[in-house]
Image (spheres, grey):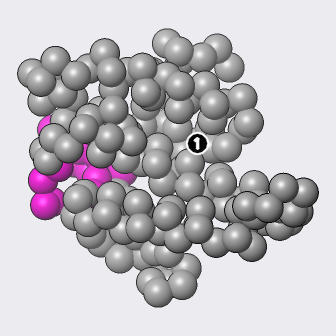
Amino acid sequence: MSLFGLGSCGFLQPSKFALWDPHRILYEYRWADGEKIKKPIEVSAPRYVELLMDWIEGQLDNESLFPQRLGSPFPPNFKDVVKTIFKRLFRVYAHIYHSHFQKIVSLKEEAHLNTCFKHFILFTCEFVLIDRKELAPLQELIESIVVF
């Protein structure tokens, strides 16, 4: 969770990885990596984050996707892979803000989380890495950071 500016708070609950309002599920995120898990499955929030971090590490370590030698070409699908990484990271931010922000405030970590998210979303917008419809769960917060 340090990627999200939270150290290892351990506050993600083993419940469905979803965004709720008091009456219903607004968004539900399921996991599929396209390799081991092809059909999206329901997982808990901690499990989603664990699977995501492992998957991202695998992508970054794959030299055919992320060449390490200077001058090596990037593959044609490079931006698609990066977009998928960012879309999935955004889902974790959305879950944290929607389901755990009061806990973040009680830990006095909101300024750090907000700064990390601001950098994340500015980079995302600069390089058009997430479709606008995917940003809907945090649209109000994003609009306070970025003018579209």
Q: Give how far across and how far down residue 35 sits, in percent.
A: 54, 84
The magenta segment is 12-27
- Which image quadrant for residue 17? bottom left
Q: Is residue 19 left or right of residue 105?
A: right
- The residue tagged with tag 1: helix, strand or loop? helix
Name the residue: 42% across, 20% down: 115
Based on the picture, tell me whether residue 18 belongs to the magenta stretch.
yes
Q: Position of residue 59 (x, y in %)?
A: 58, 67
Q: State whether residue 138 is above or below residue 57.
A: above
Tell whether 86 sits left or right of 82: left
Indicate the quadrant where residue 64 lies.
bottom right
* Residue farthest to the front, as pictured: 69
- Position of 25 with respect to 121 (left or right) is left
Residue 85 falls in which quadrant of the image? bottom right
- Residue 102, x across and y down, in percent: 14, 26
Q: Where's the C terminus, which quadrant? A: top right
Q: Inspect the image, locate mark 1, and give the three-letter code of the amino acid beneath it.
A: Lys
Q: Main secondary structure of the magenta part?
A: loop
Specify the farthest residue to the left: 106
- Image mark count: 1
Residue visible at 16% across and 18% down? 108
Residue at the (33%, 26%) spot, across then down? 113
Q: Residue at x 79, y 61 (%)?
A: 69
Q: Quadrant where the N terminus lies?
A: top left
Q: Which residue is mark 1?
A: 133
Is residue 14 visible from the viewing direction of this image?
Answer: yes
Residue 23 spot, x, y in % from top left: 17, 43
